Amino acid sequence: MRSERGQALLEFALLLPVAVLLMLGFADMMYAIVQAGSVSAIAVETARCLALNGPQCNSKSAVTNYVASQASGLAIPQAQSNLSVVASACQNNECAVTLRYVYPRIGIYFPPTTIVRTGYASQATPPEGP
């Protein structure tokens, strides 16, 4: 009986670090997916700003500032240094904005991951009323 208790304790001690590492990795992966959704939302909102010719999106630096303000509203960690505008352009009544976010992973076991998202918006005017 005594050797069986010791065996169970040893198995638990050997498997606990692996189980904790798996749980941390899963939690970090879920948080990265949430951040990717936030970056997508910022890309779409920035493309919409370009399409509407808003004064806050009339130059490249203005677009960068708009992206930074949107990121601070969504609480993206380290957005000032890790979120950048790759491309923004309007062509054929269609505006596109591509953002790149370097997601800082936790711990030494999980390397940083780059999230790239593109948002689109149309410059088309809505139809006239009835």
Image: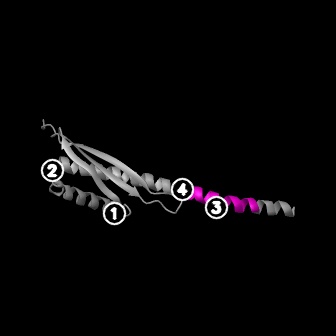
Q: How is the image coloured?
A: one colour
Q: Position of residue 61 (x, y in %)?
A: 20, 59
Earlier in the chain: of badge 3 and badge 2, it is 3
Mark linked to residue 25: 4
Residue at 52% over, 62% down:
108
Q: Residues within 10 Å of mark 1 (few under 14, many from 20)?
A: few
How much space separates mark 2 and mark 4, taking CA atoms?
42 Å
Q: Is residue 18 magenta?
A: yes
**Local secondary structure at mark 1:** helix
Earlier in the chain: of badge 3 and badge 4, it is 3
Earlier in the chain: of badge 2 and badge 4, it is 4
Mark linked to residue 81: 1
How much space separates mark 3 and mark 4, taking CA atoms?
12 Å
Q: Which residue is mark 3?
A: 17
- Nearer-the-camera pick, 49 or 59: 59
How much space separates mark 4 and mark 1, taking CA atoms?
24 Å
Q: Name the front one of labels 3 and 2.
A: 3
Q: Is residue 59 magenta?
A: no
Q: Name the front one of labels 2 and 4.
A: 4
- Do labels 3 and 1 touch, CB within 8 Å? no
Q: Quick check: 22 above or below 125?
A: below
Report the predominant secondary structure element of the magenta stretch.
Answer: helix
How much space separates mark 3 and mark 2, taking CA atoms?
53 Å
Mark linked to residue 53: 2
- Nearer-the-camera pick, 37 or 129: 37
Q: Name the front one of labels 1 and 2.
A: 1
**Local secondary structure at mark 2:** loop
**Local secondary structure at mark 4:** helix
Magenta span? 10-25
